[in-house]
Amino acid sequence: MAGLTDLSLAAMRAGLKAKQFSARELVTAHVEAVEAARPLNAFLVETPDHALAAADAADGALARGEAGLLAGIPLGIKDLFCTKGVETTASSRILMGFVPTYESTVTAKLFAAGAAMLGKLNLDEFAMGSSNETSAYGPVISPWRAQGSTAKLVPGGSSGGSSAAVAARLCAAATGTDTGGSIRQPAAFTGIAGIKPTYGRCSRWGVIAFASSLDQAGVLARDVTDCALVLEAMAGYDPKDSTSLDVPVPHYAGGLTGSLKGKRIGIPKEYRVDGMDPVLEDLWQKGIDWARDAGAEIVEVSLPHTKEALPTYYVVAPAEASSNLARYDGVRYGLRVAPDGGSLSDMYAATRAAGFGAEVKRRIMIGTYVLSAGYYDAYYLKAQKVRALIAQDFARAFEACDLLLTPTAPTGAFELGAKTADPIAMFLNDVFTVPASLAGLPAMSIPAGLDGQGLPLGLQLIGRPLDEMGVLDAAFALESRAGFSAAPVRWW
Amino acid sequence: MAVDDKMVLRVAGLARLKLAPAEVPHLTGELNSILGWIDQLQAVDTGDVQPMDAVIPLTRAWRADVISDGNIQADVLANAPQAAHGFFAVPKVIE
């Protein structure tokens, strides 16, 4: 049934409730869309049986009037979430063939709410990247194309499979994870919405670790309401994650008002970087006008350590990654390469050399170096101190305002291969998203307009700790004024 | 603080990464470029700033000191590249 894949998640829920279509029909339409979209390389594993079983269960629950929040809703799951009985690789060769015997807390909560998993989504290897080009299973191709061009574009990263799948209407929403911008930047690149909640809002249990003080699960969906619905289902305290926050989860979708009366929106002056695309600058100004129109007071604020956020991140994240990835040693799971007659140490080194890709190795090397004796104080301790200053900047800004409004990424999507030769050029994609990650703040990207080539650009809202509701509501107010309705034209 | 090939090999040893000889100079160049860029942090005055290792102040949760899981040997070994007699199997460690 064509047309079902074009519905928003909220419209799917309404249609299911009104018996306009069954969950089986809804899920079948999406299973077919997933199969037809293989040229995008968004899914690493397709799980139609899982999806259809959940659909039938949802139809039963709907008939009995017992349907959960996401009953029969087709979702994609980033392949960083462990799923019981379904191969989970983090897009790395080193986890090829790994089939978890347990379910991550986030996916367990989504399935308990009735969601149907269509499959596991491609990502940058271990979520390390900003373009989905570091995946061991090949890059994801964005469903978007620049005007008058057939060149392949990146869908952003690391949640590139998630962003491509949602933008191409393969699933209603997808899970993502965000360490330095991995939900918000791909959402911006593909014209969809994406929220990274406060660090600790969603359980990290069963999510393959990259940088544990930064990693946070979140959602990518077509619009703000859909993000609110999925976030409500996946958030909440989990005793199995010691950094999980034991606070109630609001009914986000029910709290969306679209009014910013009495709210102060801060515009950080340091985000006006040199050489910013005039189209993006103009869009940011439009966002400011939309916020004012919704009743907000606009105030200029300062985040003095913005420039230092990226280098801080590229010490802290690789340091934590080098420690987290030490577990891949060829002993307990995943790949093993044991040279003939070699020792246990030879096996470790050969396994890791064969299993990790170039970007992951580079980050392990940086992380190991900055944590090693003689360099720890100069790099790691220094970065932790600058991180404290960055968090203080935000705390001070939030004395003068309730939310911050910035662009999500400095440019729109670029062509495959355009930035792979220069790691630092790739890092600069995350210049506007990394600071909020370092401070653990909730932040969201919404599609706001198109660049000169007809490609989507996003605006970012950043809130106080645990104020996802404020972030979502402000995004809702801007979304209705932006009136973004562009979608990729199907070519696959 | 420039790194040389010798340092790259030392760090690779610590990280248990076997490097092909051709990879070494390449990684040395990349690491120097990235570490050179990171060096801008040295200019930030962090005099009496306390290093930050957790973004949200947490009160550690308590629970009763009882076994909450276990008896899942088969699950634990299910993904092992090699298992024998209920253990992970590895190349001989003691000669």
Image: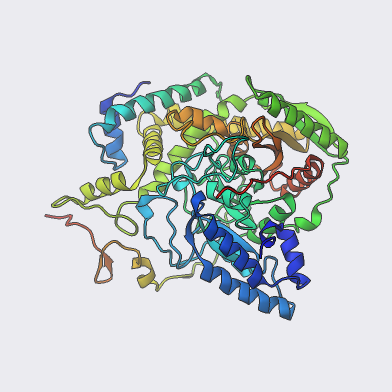
Residue A298 image point, x, y percent = 82, 31
Residue B18 image point, x, y percent = 26, 40
**Left or right: A443, with A261 as reference point:** left
Along the line of sight, which residue is nearer the eye, A436 or A162?
A: A162
Q: State the scheme by which the image is colored.
A: rainbow
Q: In the current view of this chain or complex, which residue is farthest to the front?
A: A148
Above/below status of A454 relative to A271? below
Q: In the current view of this chain or complex, which residue is farthest to the left?
A: B95
Residue A238 visible (yes or no) = no
Instruction: Give the quadrant of residue A228.
Output: bottom right
**Left or right: A22, with A431 as reference point:** right
Along the line of sight, which residue is nearer the eye, A78 or A146?
A: A146
Above/below status of A418 relative to A111? above
Residue A9 visible (yes or no) = yes
Which residue occupies 60% across, 62% down? A30
Above/below status of B2 relative to A365? above
Instruction: Give the quadrant of residue A448.
Output: top right
Which residue occupies 47% across, 25% down? B38
Q: How many numbered circles does the render carry? A: 0
Residue A436 image point, x, y percent = 63, 37
Along the line of sight, which residue is nearer the eye, A421 or A404?
A: A421
Q: Quadrant of the N terminus of chain A?
A: bottom right
Residue A112 image point, x, y percent = 62, 69
Instruction: Give the quadrant of residue B71.
Output: bottom left
